[in-house]
Image (spheres, coloured by chain):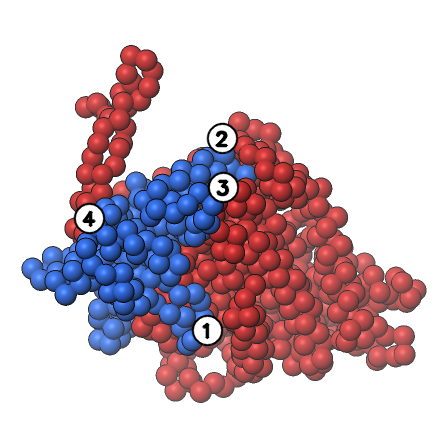
Amino acid sequence: MKTFLSEIRSAVMVTLTLAAVCCGLYPLVVFGVSQLFFRDKANGSLITDAKGAVRGSRLIGQPFSADKYFHPRPSAAGNGYDGASSGGSNLGPTSQKLNDAVKDRIAQYRKENGLSESEPVPADAVTASGSGLDPHISPRNAELQTPRVAKARGVSEDKLRELIRENTDNPDLGFLGESGVNVLRLNLALDQPSGN
Amino acid sequence: MQPSDWLQLAVYVVTLAAITKPMGLYLMQVLDAGGRTWLDPVLKPLERLTYRLMGVRPDGEQDWRRYTGSMLLFSLVGLLFTYAILRLQHLLPLNPQGFGPVSPDLAFNTAVSFTTNTNWQSYSGESTMSYLSQMVALAFHNFVSAATGIAIAAALVRGIARHSTKLLGNFWVDLVRITYYLLLPICLVFAVILVSQGMIQNFRPYTKASLVEPMKISVEKKNDKGATIKSPDGKTVMEEQTVTEQVIPQGPMASQVAIKMLGTNGGGYVNANAAHPFENPTPLSNFLQMLSIFAIGSGLTWYLGRMTKNQAHGWSVWAAMMALFLGGVLLCWWAEAAGNPIHHQLGAAVADGNMEGKEVRFGIFNSALFATVTTDASCGAVNAMHDSFTALGGFVPLFNMQLGEIIIGGVGAGLYGMLVFVVLAVFIAGLMVGRTPEYLGKKIQSYEVKMAMLALLVLCFTLLGFAAWASVSAWGLAGRNNEGPHGLSEILYAFSSAVGNNGSAFAGLSANTPWYNTTLGIAMLFGRFLMIVPIMAMAGSLAQKKLVPASAGTFPVSGVTFIVLLLGTVLLIGALNFLPVLTLGPVVEHFLTAQGKLF
């Protein structure tokens, strides 16, 4: 009995001590160092406009549907790009629902961008991402949307391609991951006076 | 399957191999109660203070019963600690979103889930858990459940390496040393690196951003009482709404994600887990997260070799694990790159592969690699939605978990799981040549084989039993997000994940119901503790044995023959147990996809 009580004491005390160190001290140290050296990133890489209002995060995608903007991927987060409920569609390969959605999105994508019925549509343009907040589209997807945006804005396609290049995240260290065009950053650049 | 993808795979494997020995050497120091590390000047006083508060003598070793008893008691106290915080989070500080208390069944499920290193999540973090719940109730177990797993593996290795003794070390000392010397320092550095990539670490309330282009949506019209309104012809009435704001979650994420990955916990800070741009901002953060999942488990194989004075044995176990790993990656990667023929038929570009549920920055390869790594280990973090993988792409994570997560595996859990198969492989080899089997100078007798089989059979019965029950019950079927064979896969995946203490999901399954929360909770407890107890009994028995000198008839536990035999044992047992049910799930779904059948 005595050993059992001393074991309980050990269990309770080690729980409290490790909680204080690992769940109090440790996150606070990480917090302090991050705020000191990576303040912008630690606070969500937020984008503010000239008036100081927060317009979004460089890392989090936003919905766009007007012709004058590049469109992001379909999103299954809430009603679309809902930052408070991230997630994917979780529909499997034989899902009728997914099949219907992909079919509609392909038709819409071809119509919006003036593609022929036989032209393959980039997969990322017609599938929802895992997070529902994917900030990127593939370079091919951006390229296919360029004529539409150029027409809607009355700017040259070459000018748009330059902006696309500027807002493309290339593979880390030159080989890790895939290139992606950051849609929110790109669209904000379009709205800048110089981009129009 | 681009050349750049092959390069990434090669870099991953080479980096992992390169850190295995340094990690193993460091583990030698940490797992020796009197070992010295370069962090002693800082951490030794803290370690001594902790022992004093606990009333533990660091030089007092325990036999297997005491060791296991201490571990179980500690896990129980930790479970209650977490349960209490979750139930009371509305009364506690650091809750800027004002989240209410977690329901009893969800709190039970979550407390069990984090105590058992599973991190199955029936909830979405960003809409359920306060900062205090994340940082204390959950992250606490991210540290200590990992430390517990490593401690059990160390005790088993000591049982194998020692002879003629009952003592296996002291659980309290192992727990404290692993947490302070191994997990904390690595996490401190790792967390800051993650922030440098864009991960958040703050205590602000969620940010509201005004959308650049407000979004028009059509939602179900509700009356004053919040119920949907039906038109006379029975259709739900919809109304147009304009969304002008985006809520951006905040919180102390990086400190939690570092230990979530290093400790193979896997519980996402937010619902989308490592697919979320905050929780895995760049391909580099993705690479480091995948590496950290395998880092300690890989080092433990080196520790095994050094402790048993048979480094070739350690490397052979590692090689067997890597063979299974590569097999899984290649199959999953190929299946995802090949994509879904049904969507190709509709006009989606064939070369892009299956992008449903995947992020552009990771693409096909890094999603397939992550899925394989996270289920080889008992991590369970996901950077893509496994539920939306192709049939064979989803088969790989499912089968990885059913093999017992012994491919590098969860920290500690992978090694002690694999050593069960090593004992069986040695036993089978002994039967084939008609000698008493020996393992590193110890006779393997009926007691050890019984304990090894017990550990395996408990897992198999729990997994298949619960999955079978759920798939013929209304409560089980109600949770499915997909029809047809994929629905069965969702249920099977949930119980494989729970029993294997993985925590990933075919996340379409709506598991936040009292039935699922309770059954999955029990499955997690069985999968963790009913595996550890027989393994510790085996460790205790092995430690007491006398050494038998090796002879010409001793089966060598290193080299190609051993590796092949070990692989055969793992695959044979896994296949015999689970192929029948897998045939009804992902295998048949694969053929149906090829035929274009929809559900």
Front label number (4 vs 3)? 3
Q: Distance between the residues labelled 2 and 3?
A: 30 Å
Which residue appears farthest toward the right when viewing the image?
B434
The residue to which callout 1 is attached is A175
Q: How far apart are marks 1 and 4 (CA)?
A: 34 Å
Marking on residue B433: none
Q: Of helix, strand and loop, which one carries label 1?
A: loop
**Mark nearer the viewer, 2 or 4:** 4
As drawn, the chain in blue is A
Dot 2: element: loop
Q: Name the residue under label 4.
A: B213
Residue B155 lies, in percent from the top left, at 61, 69
Q: In which quarter of the image is the N terminus of chain B?
A: bottom right
Q: What residue type is labelled 3?
A: Leu
Please give the letter of the chain rendered in red: B
Residue B391 in the image: state x and y as whole percent.
59, 46
Q: What element carries label 3?
A: helix
- Callout 4 environment at 10 Å: few (<14), some (14 to 19), or many (20+)? some
Against B185, residue B452 (above or below) is above
Q: Is residue B160 visible?
A: yes
- Amino acid on which the number 2 mark rests in the picture: Ala
**Residue assigned mark 2:** B478
Closer-to-camera residue (A161/A22) = A161
Of the two numbered discs 3 and 1 in the rendering, the one whose residue sits closer to the viewer:
3
The amino acid beneath tag 4 is Glu
Which residue sits furthest top? Answer: B232
Kindly report the distance in space between the C-alpha atoms of the residues bearing marks 2 and 4.
38 Å
Badges 2 and 3: C-beta atoms under 8 Å apart? no
Q: Do the residues labelled 2 and 4 touch (CB within 8 Å)?
A: no
